[in-house]
Amino acid sequence: MNLIIQSTLKTLQKSQVLLHHISNEQLCDASVSPYYSSIGCHIRHILDFYDCIFNVDEHQKVDLTARSRNKAVECDCGSAQGYLDTIVQKLNSASFNVNDIVLVTDDLGMGKTEIPYTYGALLAQANSHTIHHYAIINYIFDSLGIVINDDEFGYNPTTPKEVSAE
């Protein structure tokens, strides 16, 4: 299996741990300022990004703005777990070559634009995007008093680790 897919699966494993340790009420709690977004909203958004990658059309085009936005995923851990399982299964059985070119439609703030990527670059972006949303979820955890025993949750792998003084 390709290193990019392995890394992505490792990152998404944290979503599974999260979903097994919180309640539906915690998943959909949108009480934390300043954005008032829920953990479920972020999980759904992460999974929608991956879902878009697997909705490539016959012209090798992916539209990252065509997200499914299934609201049930935002408030039900079982629905979120099912969606996650589907994405993991698709990653495990992916048949594309990470060096193949795919045309990606995205909105960078000035309207939709089409950008050539490799599948590898698109998956690397999705992985970084996931970690970014984990950082936001970690902030929500802290505000809601939720503890997940994972010192790396929400941190980019390139973030320097604190060195203890001896």
Image: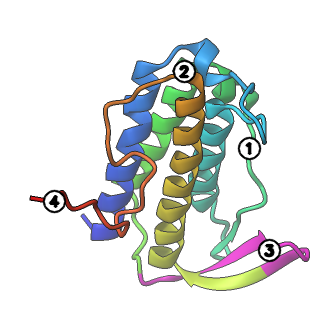
Cα separation between marks 3 and 1: 19 Å
The amino acid type found where label 1 is placed reads Ser
Q: Are marks 4 and 2 in contact (CB under 8 Å)?
A: no
The amino acid type found where label 4 is placed reads Ala
> Which mark, by number, is residue 68?
1
For residue 48, side relative to residue 5 (left or right): right
Mark toward the start of the polypeptide (3 vs 2): 2
Within-10-Å neighbours for mark 2: few <14, some 14–19, many 20+: many
In this rendering, the label closer to the viewer, 4 or 3: 4
The amino acid type found where label 3 is placed reads Leu
Circle 3 sits on which residue?
A: 108
Residue at the outermost front position? 166
Cα separation between marks 4 and 3: 43 Å
Q: Quadrant of residue 91?
A: bottom left
Of 109 and 90, nearer the camera is 109
Cα separation between marks 1 and 2: 17 Å
Residue at the location (43% across, 70% down)? 96
In the displayed structure, 35 sits above or below 52; it is: above
Within-10-Å neighbours for mark 1: few <14, some 14–19, many 20+: few
The amino acid type found where label 2 is placed reads Cys
> Which mark, by number, is residue 77?
2
Circle 4 sits on which residue?
A: 165
Q: Quadrant of the C terminus?
A: bottom left
Of 43 and 141, nearer the camera is 141
Residue 47 percent coordinates (x, y): 58, 45
